[in-house]
Image (spheres, rainbow, N blue to C red):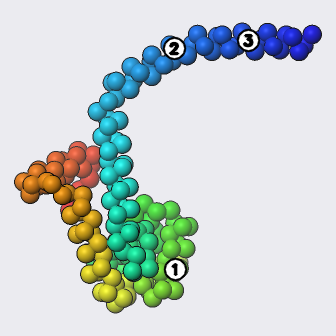
Amino acid sequence: MSETFSTVERAKLARKSAAEKPARNMENERLKAELEVESTLGWLFNDIHRLLGKDFGSRIGELGLTRAQCRVLFTIERAAAPLTQTEIAELTEIEKAPLGKMLDRLEQGGWIVRKSDPKDRRARRVSVTAKIDKAFPVAAAAAKGTFARALQGMRQSDVKELIARLEKLKRNLGGADG
């Protein structure tokens, strides 16, 4: 009997779910329509970021570095002084544990050096080595190639306007210039 009851109950649930589904779908469709601009912009920004990274990564292959490693190296290189792992993690938005492993590999590859922080015996300061000087022209050429591909068919005035509008979005979200 419980087998029959279970089948009957399952049928009732299926009918109830089928009746609720159009209402849920209508609500979802309404929300999608309300968020069309936001959704489109969000997906575009995400896809553009992903595709830029993929293109750039394919162009830096000769360095033997990943995109993430390049980002870390050039973050360290741009800093006014050697950085701690915590500072690098904050600037690159990479969690400390995976960043630590990445820094180990970069150190083994001769890309960075770690030295004790004279003010905090628990911390170590990270700086790039002269090996970055060989990587910079390759990375610069890769970036130029990636953006040339991305911006092909756009006038210089369109690109300047795009940059100005993106900077405005950044400021609106609390990002600093530069």
Q: Pointer 2: what residue?
A: 22
Name which residue type carries label 3.
Ala
Residue denoted by label 3: 11
Circles 1 and 3: CB atoms closer than 8 Å: no
Q: Secondary structure at mark 2?
A: helix
Spatial separation of the CA atoms under disc 2 and disc 3: 18 Å
Quarter occupied by the N terminus: top right
Mark 1 and mark 3 lie on one chain; the one further toward the N terminus is 3
Q: Earlier in the sequence, mark 2 or mark 1?
A: 2
- Mark on residue 73? none
Number of residues whose C-alpha sits closer than 10 Å to that of mark 1, classed few (under 14), some (14–19) or many (20 or more): some
Residue 72: image location, x then y, percent: 40, 72
Nearer to me, 94 or 86? 94
Q: Nearer the viewer, mark 1 or mark 3?
A: 3
- The alpha-carbon separation of the residues under discs 1 and 3 comes to 58 Å
Amino acid under label 1?
Arg
Mark 3 neighbour class, 10 Å CA radius: few under 14, some 14 to 19, many 20 or more: few
Residue 117's place in the image compared with 175, above or below, is below
Q: Secondary structure at mark 1?
A: helix
Crowdedness of circle 2 by 10 Å Cα count: few (<14), some, many (20+)?
A: few
Q: Amino acid at mark 2?
A: Pro
**Residue 68 position within the rendered picture, expressed as x and y whole percent measured from the top left:** 43, 68
